[in-house]
Amino acid sequence: MENSQQKKNANVYLGRFVLIFLLAALFVAVYTLILQKNYKTNTLEAAVERDIECSDAIHTLVSDRFNKADYDEINTKADMDTPRYQELQQRLNELRTLNSTRYLYTAKRNSEGKLIYLVDGLDLDADDFAYPGTYIEDEMIPYIEVALEGENVYSQDIVDTTWGHIFTACYPVRDAETNEIIGALCIEMDMESSYLFLEKINNIVFKAAVVAAFVIVLIIIFMYRWMRKQNEKDLIQQKKLEETAAAADAANAAKTRFLLNMSHDIRTPMNAILGYSKLMRGHISDPEMQHYQEMIEQSGNVLLSIINNVLDMARIESGEMELDENYSETGNIVSGVCSVFEMESQKKNLTIEHYVNVQHPDIICDKTKMQEVLTNIIGNAVKYTPPGGTITITTDELPDEREGYIKIRTVVEDNGIGMSREFLPHLFDSFTRERDTTSAKVVGTGLGMAIVKSLVDLMDGSVTVESELGKGTKFTVTIPHKIAPPEYYAKKASNEANEKVEFSGKHILLAEDNDLNAEIAILLLEEMGFSVDRVEDGICCVDKLEKEPTGTYDLILMDIQMPNMDGYKAASIIRHLPDVGKSGIPIVAMTANAFAEDRKKAFEAGMNGHIAKPIDASKIKETLAEILK
């Protein structure tokens, strides 16, 4: 066993040594490659710079020796016999032979627009001597054309021509009197030695690259073998992680099911508590009993808020939260939230001031989520502002970069207890509170601000906070909204008309298995003027509708989770009844399944509306008025 371990350790050390050696070889090869490349670049730049200086010197010597006649009167081989041509040719030849200049000549564009040689500084008996009128080679045309445009031009690399490797420079030649460009002076320097030297460097670089490539191949082979073994370990680890993830997903799914069931099971008795409490409100006159009723209703709303926060956080974490946008009025969103805290603010003698300054009050938004954001913020302001304090809410409009959109900014500022600078970075974390329930004597889950941040992000908005202990807090929420189109105003007028709808003589079939919920619903509906028949499940609902004459019922209020047959199934059966008068009856879900996906599912089942429990009399009235108008 000990020998096996020693052998294993020896293999590890050997492997490490081989890897280090190969990496060192690769480093040397790459470093050599870089050095050679830099040396090649520097050598080429030095050669080009040297040739530029030499060319500029030659240009300076001869540029003032030419006149317009030299370019106009020399055109063909016959002009070589003129004294002026011979003088210029001799001068250029002398300059050429003084240094490494290979070619020195003048050029111009002939009457046909083609570039031609004029005076060539080569020996007259040279094999590559160019007579006046000889066409310029293609390799040189781009340089001469630039010179004829008035610019000095130099090749920045070795030019590979049919007559060898050269450096070239071309200069415009101007008439001394008119400054008109009359032609070009071209200088070509021999760079064959530089080219051969650079080729030698290239060969060295190539060999270094081959060595580097060989080393890289060895490293790849070594790493492949190592990674294959590592991959086997990773696969085992991945399998364990997948099993853990599957278990976590199952746990999350179980948590979601539990929360959804909890939502339904808690909302059902909450419907009774809040429903009876609201019904009591109008039937008691004793101040002490009114106080008790207020405490029951307030505590019920707090409990409902806590439930909603826990469920919303779970849905946000699971990515199930979606926007449900519709038409709304900016001022009503905030005023609706303020009315929720009216009772509590009066008890604490708080002053809530609300100012609205918008040019486009009618917008398209998810009103529920907007109100949830503001409910959490204003609710905290009410909680943490001492008696006699002030809460100021300002709503104004900001421009948006998109056409047809605006930004609504709502600022909630209080003079409450404030927050410490240390706590502010953690304000939007889940389950965080600067003061716990015991010390602060304020009920909460620590989820409100996390939900605010998540909902604001979902609506592409922003939320900022400024706070100081003992001085108060200022929240600023900015969210973009689409401006409501003109057809909204017709809908708005229709909604206002719905508030005046009379329900006397309207007959409702209520499908509800819970006796308390049924009693509350019947009392609320009868107060509105409806007459109500109640059944306990989906089967009885379908049976009752079929047995009664067509037109007996104007609408069905359908619970969803009922024994024997649920509300979705019952609605689907009703929609397929042969009697059109019965199959087309409006059906409204009235259920503790309160999420947006539940609302969507109700509509997919053929229902016309959705009312979430705990039921609210104003919401019932608004929904039924819209359907029965």
Image (cartoon, rainbow, N blue to C red):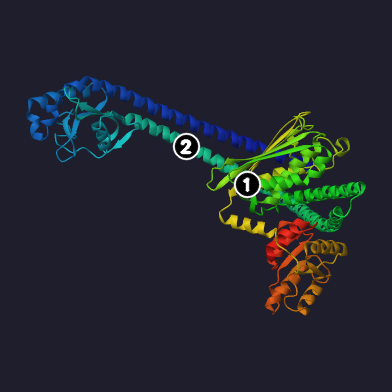
The dot on residue 224 is 1
**Residue type, mark 2 in image:** Lys
Which residue occupies the foreground of this view, 149 or 628? 628
Question: Dot 2: within a 10 Å radius of its alpha carbon, few (fewer than 14), some, or many (20 or more) residues?
Answer: some
Q: Is residue 577 above or below residue 430?
A: below
Q: Residue at x 89, y 53 (%)?
A: 284
Q: Secondary structure at mark 2?
A: helix
The dot on residue 207 is 2
Q: CA distance from mark 2 to mark 1?
A: 25 Å
Q: Residue at x 82, y 49 (%)?
A: 301
Quarter of the figure with residue 433: top right
**Residue type, mark 1 in image:** Tyr
Q: Residue 50 location in percent, x, y?
A: 33, 23
Which circle, 2 or 1, is nearer the viewer? 1
Q: Residue 596 location in percent, x, y?
A: 71, 57
Quarter of the C terminus within the rendering: bottom right
Mark before the other along the chain sequence, 2 or 1 = 2
Q: Residue 318 location in percent, x, y?
A: 73, 52
Which residue occupies the foreground of this view, 553 or 224? 553
